Image: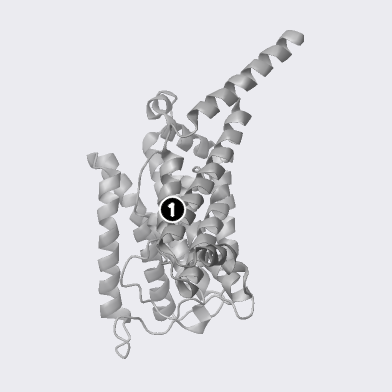
Amino acid sequence: MNSSVKRFEVFRMFFAIVIALLISFGIIFLVSEQPLTAIYTLITGPFKSKRNFANVIEAMIPLIFTGTGVCIMFSANQINLAGEGAFHLGGLVAAVVALQFGLPAGVSPVVAILLSGLAGAVFTAIPAILKIKTNASVLVSSLMLNYIALWFAMFVLMHFICDPSIGSASYLIPEASTLPTLIDRTRIHPGLFVALAAAILGYIFLFKSRIGYELRLTGQNEGFARYSGVSIVKVVLISQLLGGFIAGVGGGVELLSPIYTRFSWTSLLGYGWDAIIICTLAKNNPLYTPLAALFLAYLRTGASIMARYTDVTLEIVQITQGIIILLVVAEQFLSGYKHKMIAKEAMASLKEEEVQ
């Protein structure tokens, strides 16, 4: 029975993506004077050059971090949206450590990234503590806190690390603190392996550890978890701390990557919102976040190339994303097919038992 459900979820996800792409292609045919060229560019553009495909890998790295963090937080049924602010503060802390501490090469990025994770953990724990102490809505408080993170980062930037010759950007990040490139003429960096390690460790934590089991049990049925002796407060805090730590590490890694030379994040980058898409596609399983991040990064890179060379704008990706999310979260989408699959497998199991 469980195998049938898993196969159905894979089929359902694949079918949702196909439908979303077909609808997007239909819109392209309606608005473009060169629809076939636009669609061809969207699909094949990322493979046209080494630089283009490197853009896909570079774009998926922060998505893996925030997606994994949100998977862990959401598994406890805590809709904490503070991953966006945690990522932002992670970048700020990495910049401050790089500029102010003067640590040697090799040590500086490690310390900066770990402190970025710590800042992210503390930040995402705030909505959880407010929930525990005052029963405040985690969704609302975390959403508002993201803007506190943004303006706090702006304050620190403008008053402590701002380069007067540039304006709203920090001094150059020292070379000793930046992550090296792994492939010539690209900006792919070791953060890719850190992100993949975070996804794997997140999966092990959620599905192979006792606290991970308690966390998922709390998310599925808090009343039963409490009756079973699970400490709800402990589970909620651990999930939010760990999820925020991973998001904060992602911000630190992104800021110290070859993509940036200064801290210039004067607005929220949106990776926390993207994480919800990644989490939805991955079905709250950190092991699948790299695949979901790869898909979204590929789609966005292809759309960016399409927008440069054809008359179709980049917004087509947002339409595709929206349709996918609507279909994935719609409980009734293909529910009849799911029931048939389960009934068919149940009948087959009964027949096997009768034969034995």
Instruction: Tell me if 108 is positioned left or right of 142 in this view.
Output: right
Out of 34 and 216, give the one closest to the viewer.
Answer: 34
147 lies above or below 92? above
Image quarter of residue 351: top right
Out of 346 and 61, give the one closest to the viewer.
Answer: 346
Secondary structure at badge 1 equals helix
Instruction: Tell me if 131 is positioned left or right of 174 in this view.
Output: left
Instruction: Tell me if 221 is positioned left or right of 343 in this view.
Output: left
Dot 1, crowdedness within 10 Å: few (<14), some or many (≥20)? some
Furthest toward the front, the residue is 33
x and y, in percent, of residue 341 in the image: 59, 26
Q: Report the quarter where the N terminus lies.
A: top right
282 lies above or below 346? below
Q: Residue, x 51% and y 71% (percent of image)?
A: 305
Q: Residue, x 37% and y 61% (percent of image)?
A: 270
| Residue 175 at least partly seen | yes
x and y, in percent, of residue 181 in the image: 59, 76
Q: Report the quarter where the C terminus lies.
A: top right
**How many circles with numbers are drawn on the protein?**
1
Task: Tell me which amino acid carries mark 1.
Answer: Gln
Out of 282 and 202, give the one closest to the viewer.
Answer: 282
x and y, in percent, of residue 280 in the image: 46, 46
Write down the residue under mark 1. 321
Q: Residue, x 25% and y 67% (percent of image)?
A: 151
Q: Residue, x 48% and y 65% (percent of image)?
A: 303
